[in-house]
Image (spheres, rainbow, N blue to C red):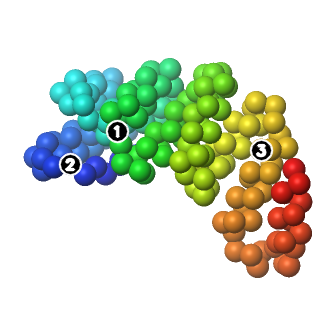
Amino acid sequence: MVITTVMGDKRMSTLIEFNTKKAQDLIKKGKVEEGLLLLEDLCHRFPNNGYVWLNYALELDGLSLEERAIPNYKMALKLGLNEDQQRIALVCLASSFRNVGENVAALDTVVDAMQKYPDNPTVACFYSLILLENQNPRHAVKILGQTLLREADPDIFEGFKNALDEKFKCL
């Protein structure tokens, strides 16, 4: 996943984009360590750039290296990201916490994401999954159902949208 960045220095931005894409291409071609080293080098060269840390975390995460990705997501968030990048980082961090069995941290992170992005369906879906893993299935179904009702074309509910909405509110 490539995320775009807005930076004042066009040359630095171009260098970061070029090397990020190069690293991702290396990883796709099976040269995983080489690609990861290139991303790690970018983090050392641009230690105050949250975007760089986020891309490194995303690649680690995509390789199921969540334990290595987690501190990089945290660093990216600490350094600052634009709104879309922050949403992605929070969702991926919560998911990584969930995948390594840190359910409390996953729930805390996804709740933070829900507070910042209450109408985002991706955030809501991950929130539902994490609620389910934290033995809260009723609330998980409520969030997922309300998200479906909000996002889907009302016609698919064949006139039952209001009834379903009331049922989900009662959960």
Residue 133 in the image, given as x and y percentages of width and height? 75, 32
Give the residue pinned by disc 2: 7
Residue 109 in the image, given as x and y percentages of width and height? 57, 34
Q: Secondary structure at mark 3?
A: helix
Above or below: residue 169 compared with residue 71: below
| Residue type of the residue flagged with mark 2 | Met
Residue 158 located left or right of residue 74: right
Residue beneath the point at 84% across and 72% down = 162
Give the residue pinned by disc 1: 80
| Residue type of the residue flagged with mark 3 | Ala
Q: Secondary structure at mark 1?
A: loop
Q: How far separated are the C-alphas under marks 3 and 2?
A: 38 Å
Q: How far separated are the C-alphas under marks 1 and 3?
A: 30 Å
Residue 161 in the image, given as x and y percentages of width and height? 82, 72
Residue 23, quarter of picture = top left
| Residue type of the residue flagged with mark 1 | Gly
Instruction: Count neighbours of disc 2 (C-alpha within 10 A) and say few if under 14, some if 14 to 19, many if 20 or more.
Output: few
The reply to whether residue 101 is in sight is yes
Give the residue pinned by disc 3: 140
Residue beneath the point at 60% across and 53% down = 118
Above or below: residue 46 compared with residue 89: above
**Could you tell which of marks 1 and 3 lies nearer the N-terminus?**
1
Above or below: residue 129 compared with residue 41: below
Instruction: Count neighbours of disc 3 (C-alpha within 10 A) and say few if under 14, some if 14 to 19, many if 20 or more.
Output: many
